[in-house]
Image (cartoon, rainbow, N blue to C red):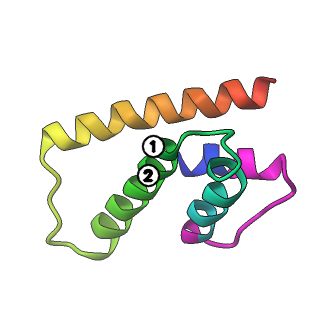
Amino acid sequence: MFMAAEAALLTRQVAPGSHRGVVAAFGEHFVKTTLFERADGRDLARAHEQRVAAEYDPTTRVPAAEAEELLGVARKFVAKVEAFLAR
């Protein structure tokens, strides 16, 4: 999701230097402008939160069902960005 969001941002000549910056810039350039839905911005932020928790807190455990659900969300997000980039 991060790489897809980053690719979309590059179409606007925006290249944030951090994951958090990508989430914020995606919201500013794509969600606030209604090119993407608010849910897409929330999904990207949620995925970022999960990644940070998993990477920096070794006690973090994500239930399999939640991981599967987030994987489905990620696939849909990437497909939306791919469709945007194809236009």
Q: In the drawing, what numbered circle is on residue 62?
A: none
Mark 1, residue position: 39
Specify whether 63 is left or right of 75: left
**Residue 51, relative to residue 9: is it above or below?**
below
Q: Which residues are magenta?
A: 6-20
- Give the spatial CA distance, label 2 vs label 1: 5 Å
Q: In the drawing, what numbered circle is on residue 42?
A: 2
Helix, strand or loop status at disc 1: helix
Q: Residue 84 lies in what quarter of the image? A: top right
Within 10 Å of disc 2 (Cα), the crowding (few <14, some 14-19, many 20+) is: some
Magenta stretch holds residue 18: yes
Q: Residue 4 lies in what quarter of the image? A: top right
Within 10 Å of disc 1 (Cα), the crowding (few <14, some 14-19, many 20+) is: few
The location of residue 64, given as percent across then percent down, is 14, 40
Q: Are marks 2 and 1 in contact (CB under 8 Å)?
A: yes
Q: Residue 8 lies in what quarter of the image? A: top right
**Residue 67, relative to residue 13: is it above or below?**
above
Helix, strand or loop status at disc 2: helix
The location of residue 53, given as percent across then percent down, is 29, 68
The location of residue 67, given as percent across then percent down, is 24, 42
Amino acid type assigned to the residue bearing label 1 in the image:
Ala
Query: Which residue is painted at 84% across and 52% down in the image?
Result: 12
Query: Which residue is painted at 35% across and 36% down in the image?
Result: 71
Query: Which residue is painted at 32% across and 59% down in the image?
Result: 50
Amino acid type assigned to the residue bearing label 2 in the image:
Arg
Q: Quadrant of the C terminus?
A: top right
Specify whether 30 is left or right of 63: right
Q: How many marks?
A: 2
Specify whether 28 is left or right of 77: right
Residue at the right extreme, as displayed: 13
**Residue 43, relative to residue 18: is it above or below?**
above
Specify whether 63 is left or right of 39: left
